[in-house]
Amino acid sequence: MGMARRFGIGWQVGGTTGWGVYGLALMLRGAARGLAPVPVYISPTFTPDPLQARLIAPLRSRWFIEQEFFSLGEGAVQADYPFLLGLGNDLAPPDAIDYISGMPDIGVVFFEHRAIPAADLARAKDRFAGMVAGSSWNAEVLRDHGFGNVVFCPQGVDLTRFHPAPKDGALAGRFVVFSGGKLEFRKGQDIVVEAFRRFHARHPEALLMVAWHNHWDASVASLERSPHGVGRPGRDAETGAWRIAEWLASQGVPPDAVIDLGEVAHAEMPRLLRECDVGLFPNRCEGGTNLVAMECMACGVPAILSANTGHRDLLARPGASLALTVQGTVAGTADDAPDLFLDWGESDPDEAVERLEWVFANRAEAAETGARGAAFLREWAWPDKIDALLSTLGWL
């Protein structure tokens, strides 16, 4: 074990978030390729299966030593190996790990705004030897801002789980529209609600299946920005769960037309996705390539995608998904920085309804779109994407 190349993973590994899924794939694939990944934090909900446990067993004793070292951090802690650090909109790691640095530091970034303050740009250029961008849009923005060493490396999909397979038929007789991603203005669920309400009025057998779990009240509150005046759901006083069905009912979508999945274990999602006839993703912006949409496509479910930001990477293969091509300007308020929503796109609910109607009326052609989407996503397996990243960094 002694000489394996170590590298730090500077974000949470495991759990239900996109970052957690990415971190887990990086840790497991790094170990499988003979490297020694060092995660700063493993989600308490991560329980390795027997094969994963066997893979990471030789690394665990070292992790505990490293993590003791990290936790000494009165001030800065300097690791003597490269560290991949997850960055947000300010191109900085979260405070919880900002005191750790590596030799060198490499930023892994999914950001949502082109307009990045000059001070943040200067600090990031000074600190990071390279930037790994989660979408070609993010890579383009970084290059436009003068970053030299930028690599586009999208996240992958767990194709052992997310792939076409038979439905179990639990929702036979319904036309199931899937919408997933944390509930917020950026993800465009208000547009989904508006489009689905109109579609359901014509097709009472339509059913909206939602995976909108969101831990953060402030991002749910961003729905108040919606031009469709949908407001936002309240939380259940006892369970803390968002009262989605109640909110949708107030928007004219009856409870019998909604399945709210709540917070679902990642391993459960493929079976649920396969029961759907179409996925609707009118997202206003994606810093990455929208993992939920990728998982939908990988299962062979035709996806309707807004043609902006990170979604453009998923729309790059002709015929593998359906585009929402009308992308209006996203309006800011007087309190917003100018250019806050540059590159974002405002999808038209009418166009979303048209796409849903096309899938509804053309099941065979829609299934072919889904099959082409799944074929495209077969090129996005996590091991391949992680190998591409490790190779680009010169670690394989």
Image: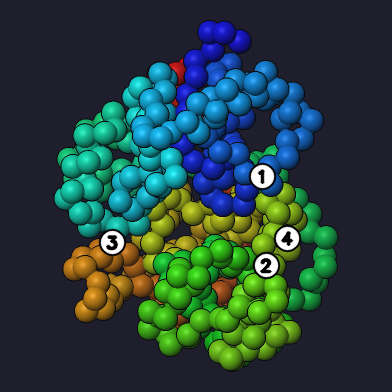
Mark 4 residue element: helix
**Distance Cα–Cα, label 4 vs label 2:** 12 Å
Identify residue type, mark 4. Answer: Leu
Tell me if label 1 and label 4 are in contact, CB under 8 Å: no
Vertical position of residue 321 compared to residue 84: above or below? below
Work out whether mark 3 precedes mark 2 in sequence or the reverse, and give the earlier one.
2
Residue 269 place in picture, x, y as percent: 69, 55
Mark 1 is surrounded, within 10 Å at the Cα level, by few (under 14), some (14 to 19) or many (20 or more) other residues, namely few
Mark 3 residue element: loop
Vertical position of residue 129 compared to residue 372: above or below? above
Identify the residue position indicated by label 3 in the image: 343
**Distance Cα–Cα, label 1 vs label 3:** 37 Å
Work out whether mark 1 precedes mark 4 in sequence or the reverse, and give the earlier one.
1
**Distance Cα–Cα, label 1 vs label 2:** 20 Å
Q: Residue 272 carries which label?
A: 4
Residue 225 place in picture, x, y as percent: 38, 79
Closer to the observer: label 3 or label 2? Answer: 2
Q: Quadrant of residue 381?
A: top right
Residue 184 place in picture, x, y as percent: 47, 70
Identify the residue position indicated by label 2 in the image: 262
